[in-house]
Image: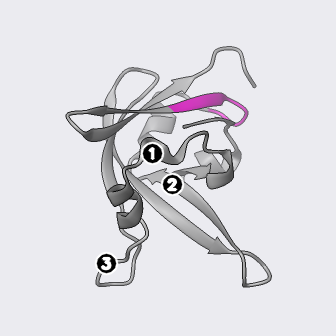
Amino acid sequence: IIQKGLFETDLAAGNNRLSIPFTRVRDHGFLTEEEARFLTTRDRNNKMKFKDVTIIEPSLRREKVKLSRWDMRKGNGKNTCSNYVINGKWRHIVERNRLEPGDVVQLWSFRINQELHFALVKLPGNK
């Protein structure tokens, strides 16, 4: 889906999220049309809906995380910038895998029995 260098904002405990900018996604086809539509809807409390997915960490541990879509208005109030976001237990993944600012990671998607999964790969020797 993406290869990116990690920023402090991706790793800060208070943020607890990995941002995946739409403009950097290599192929948006990792989501089905139904999943993509679902991520643009809101629940009864007007919060964006999310999809629970399994991620395989660099340590090979599996963790359930939340995949969301965030649409944020730019300064002019007219245009938006969109990101997919992995959160939920993201902070635990950061700690267990000793992720640091500047680390380069790849996020891959795959399906098992039609269910979306991710694999997070930390590239060696990259800062």
| Whole-percent x, y for residue 18 in the image | 55, 48
Q: Residue 85 shows which numbered tag?
A: 2
CA gap, disc 3 and disc 1: 22 Å
Crowd class of label 1 (few under 14; some 14 to 19; many from 20; radius 10 Å): many
Residue drawn at (30%, 51%), measured in percent from left and top? 52
Earlier in the chain: of badge 3 and badge 2, it is 3
Q: CA distance from mark 3 to mark 2?
A: 17 Å
Q: Are marks 1 and 2 in contact (CB under 8 Å)?
A: no
Q: Is residue 2 magenta?
A: no
Please name which of the two marks, 3 or 1, marks the residue nearer to the observer: 3
Towards the viewer: 111 or 90: 111
Question: Judging from the image, what secondary structure is the residue with disc 2 in?
Answer: strand
The disc placed on residue 90 is 1
Disc 3 secondary structure class: loop
> Position of 71 compared to 69: left or right?
right
Q: Is any part of residue 14 visible from this angle? A: no
What residue sits right under mark 3 in the picture? 43
How far from the left and from the top, in percent, is residue 7?
70, 44
